[in-house]
């Protein structure tokens, strides 16, 4: 009986050693996958910014769902209060086309900040800072790709 107990203990020890050795590998694989997801979310947000900055419709199409809902608040030059306005996916593409056709791209030093606020396996929340203000993006993984589904933005507050 003693040999059997010792054998059982040895088996348990070997299993624990195997688990201990595998745990860092599993953690590393999880960390690499999370890093890949972060990079993909950041890429979608940059496609959004660069699509507007450069007038690049392909980047907008890559990073934004055609079903996007975008709404923004800004203070018109002749007003003192905020005005709210929606922007459809087609209007985004039209804006990019105007930027490209007029050559009125953003300057190289224009703000282009991406801050991932939250990232889960299917959804993400991101804040981007651009020359026009701050945009809060909600993304979802659609057919294996991160796409922007909602945008709420505001121009910089008047000082």
Image: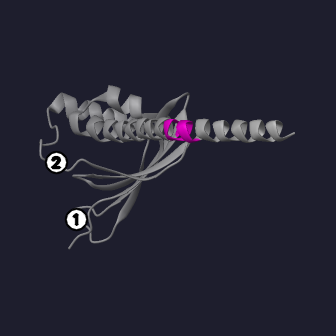
3D distance between C-alphas at marks 2 and 1:
24 Å
Crowd rating for badge 2 (residues with CA inside 10 Å; few <14, some 14–19, many 20+): few
Tell me where residue 133 appears, x and y as whole percent.
28, 57
Q: Is residue 104 above or below residue 154?
A: above
Q: Residue furthest right?
A: 1
Q: Quadrant of the N terminus?
A: top right
Which label belongs to residue 128?
none
Identify the residue at horizontal 73%, vertical 42% (top origin). 9
The stretch in magenta equals 20-26
Reading the image, the residue beneath label 1 is: 78
Q: Residue at x 80, y 36 (%)?
A: 3
Q: Is residue 8 left or right of residue 152?
A: right
Element at badge 2?
loop
In which quadrant of the rendered image does the C terminus lie?
bottom left
Residue behind mark 2: 110
Give x and y (percent) for residue 116: 39, 51
Place residue 117 in its image quadrant.
Answer: bottom left
């Amino acid at each position: 009986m003693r040999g059997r107990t010792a054998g059982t203990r040895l088996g348990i020890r070997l299993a624990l050693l195997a688990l201990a050795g595998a745990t860092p590998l599993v953690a590393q694989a999880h960390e690499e996958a999370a890093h890949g997801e972060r990079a993909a979310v950041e890429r979608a947000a940059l496609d959004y910014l660069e699509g507007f900055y450069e007038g690049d419709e392909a980047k907008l199409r890559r990073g934004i769902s055609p079903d996007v809902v975008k709404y923004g608040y800004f203070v018109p030059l002749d007003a003192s209060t905020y005005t709210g306005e929606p922007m459809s996916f087609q209007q985004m593409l039209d804006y990019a086309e105007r930027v490209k056709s007029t050559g009125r791209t953003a300057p190289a030093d224009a703000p282009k900040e991406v801050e991932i606020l939250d990232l889960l396996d299917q959804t993400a929340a991101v804040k981007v800072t651009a020359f026009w203000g701050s945009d809060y993006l909600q993304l979802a993984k659609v057919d294996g790709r991160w796409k922007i589904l909602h945008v709420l933005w505001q121009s910089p507050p008047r000082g």
